[in-house]
Amino acid sequence: MATELEITTDRRAARARHRTIPLSGTLAVVMAGLVALTAIDVLAVFWFMTAGTTRDLLGRAAQLGLDSVQARIADRFIPVEDQLAFLSRRIASGEVDPTDGAALDRLMTDALAGTPQVRVLSLTSPDGTIRGVTQGPHGVFTFADTIHRDDERQEIEEARGRQDAYWGPVHFVPAEVMRTSVANLHRPVHAGDRFVGVLTATITVDALSDHLRTIAEANPGTTPFILYGRDRVLAHPAIAADRPALSPEHPLPLLNEVGDPFLAALWTEGQPETVGEAADLEARVVRLGNDGRVILTRTVDGYAPRPLIVGVEVPVSTLDKPTDDLLHAGLAGLAVLLIAILVAIAVSRAIARPVGAMAREVRAVGSLDFASLRPLPGSLFSELNEQARAYNTMLTGLRWLETYVPKSLVRRLLRGGGAMPSTERVVTVMFTDIVDFTAVAERMPAAEVAAMLNAHFDLLGRCVEAEGGTIDKFIGDCVMAFWGAPDDQPDHADRALRAARAIAAAVVADNGERRGRGLAPLQVRIGLHSGPVVAGNIGMSGRSGYTIVGDAVNLGNRLEQLGKAVAPADEIVVLASGEMVALAADDRSGLRSLGLQAIPGRRTEIEIFRLEGPPPPGQP
């Protein structure tokens, strides 16, 4: 009878199969659909473009100048807001003392260099004193003054209750100073609860008209403009060519004072009409005699006390050409064809990508580096989805195999097709053990014991596998490893000796870290012996494991236990038999003979060597 888990798995698999679609049918539907979509869309575009309304074309015409004009406004005003915020932070934090005139002059002079659109930069103190810098064609000059008018004093009191920057109204500066209209950005400065003063940046607005003239020259037939509210002109190409007469009472010209009759009739001729999907974009058709303009406007807030209105004029005649409609229809058809090609490419890549990924992963299986392999993602296509599921199932099995079976054994099993006959070999076996682990574990929670053992085994395992050793098993706090099987390793004794040295150094370093955390160091005993063993699959029918058996294994274990008597207080004790040392040919440094020693369970004494390791930190 099927278990609940099996039933749930089958249901999920059924739902997954239901969500997928056949690859061959998908390709047929996609290609046929693209061809049909192309034909229908080209015909529809041709019809709508030929018989389309002014609304459809106004959306394209609006982009001729509005974005550029709005970007110019932002480029001119936003850096000034950022600069005043920076100066406010410097003064409020105490980095610059506002009463230190020289330091304040240097700070504002440096700020002017980064914002050339600012003509005057000043700080007005609560007592009415003004200190600032101004730049012009003859350089940068500092000045000091005091406020004289009641409206200026009123501005100080108004700023005292504010926190953020705000724009003041546009006003005209007389001829003896600069003879132009300017806009002031004010930034209150507070140091905690104390009101320090008001930073003011003065910007001339005539440069905006120069920029609009550049846009108009680059786009013949179009006229961009900026309105200050609905009745004043802030910038216009005509102002750059012929500046109107202005005064403190009349800081900006009216719509009918710039020489543009279509702009003068903007609010009186035609009905407003929303263009495209942009609710903030309005269009008005203004006709005067036989000529006409489509005027598109957009309201921009945040740069003045009154909203700014950016706009552009486009001749009506340019929007009524049938040849342009045909050209647009053709271009739209080409665009649809391009989209069809791109979609076809995307579909083909969606098919080829999982196939290519499968090929790469399968090739990587040959390297036996299962940890670097990645599961394949599912696919919309049923055939590719089944392929990914089959591969991921195989990958899960391989990773579990590598987890429970030594990596070298996995390689040998894959190469040999799973056959591992028992053979007699000469190997070097290693046993490690933590001294008094039982007593240590009794004082610790189970989770901490498991974490400590995992960290310890990880430390030892890296040293063993770095020398090509096979970890046979973990027995409590003990590790059994060997060299020379299943693969032939003529230098198995040297490998084991190098691994023992690495383990000794790693244990000493780890104990240093444990002491730093207030933990007791671990004492580790290691036994090394070389001799003949039987290596192969040992176990019951249906379940066995690759291991080694023989007297050499027992003797390696007895050498590890002998470390308790040789040096019971040392952090690391490594004992090796004379047989193992005799096989080590590369490096016998650090090996000190302890002479003949009696080994429990053996009738004859054998020569024992101790591997002298590095002293623990803090000891000579």
Image (cartoon, rainbow, N blue to C red):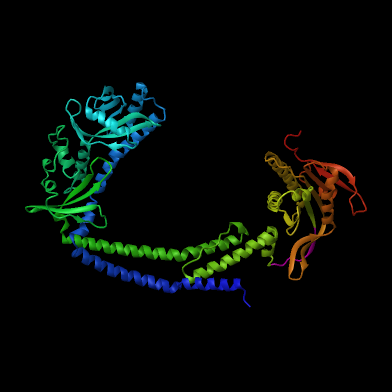
**Considering only vertical position in the picture, is 162 above or below 313?**
above
- Closer-to-camera residue (344/494): 344
Q: Nearer the viewer, residue 614 or 609?
A: 614
The answer, for residue 408, to whether it is visible in the render is yes
Q: Position of residue 51 (x, y in %)?
A: 18, 65
In x, y percent, where is residue 522? 75, 45
Is 307 situated left or right of 444 in this image?
left
Percent position (x, y) of residue 142?
Answer: 29, 23
The number of numbered discs placed on residues in the rendered structure image is 0
Q: Residue furthest right?
A: 603
Residue 301 in the image: above or below residue 148 = below
Q: Could you tell whether 495 is left or right of 374 in the image?
A: right
User: Which quadrant of the view contains residue 589?
Assistant: top right
**For residue 535: magenta?**
no
| Of the pair 217 and 115, the residue shown nearer to us | 115
Highlighted magenta segment, given as a residue range: 418-425
Q: Is residue 235 visible?
A: no
Relative to 9, 202 lies left or right: left
| On screen, residue 116 above or below 18 | above
Of residues 596 and 393, the one nearer the viewer is 393
Quadrant position of the N terminus in the picture? bottom right
Q: Residue at x 18, y 30 (%)?
A: 179
Q: Is residue 420 magenta?
A: yes
Q: Position of residue 530 (x, y in %)?
A: 81, 53
In the image, farthest residue toward the left:
289
Q: Quadrant of the C terminus?
A: top right
Tell me: residue 356, above or below residue 583.
Answer: below
Q: Image quadrant of residue 135? A: top left
Chief secondary structure of the magenta portion: loop
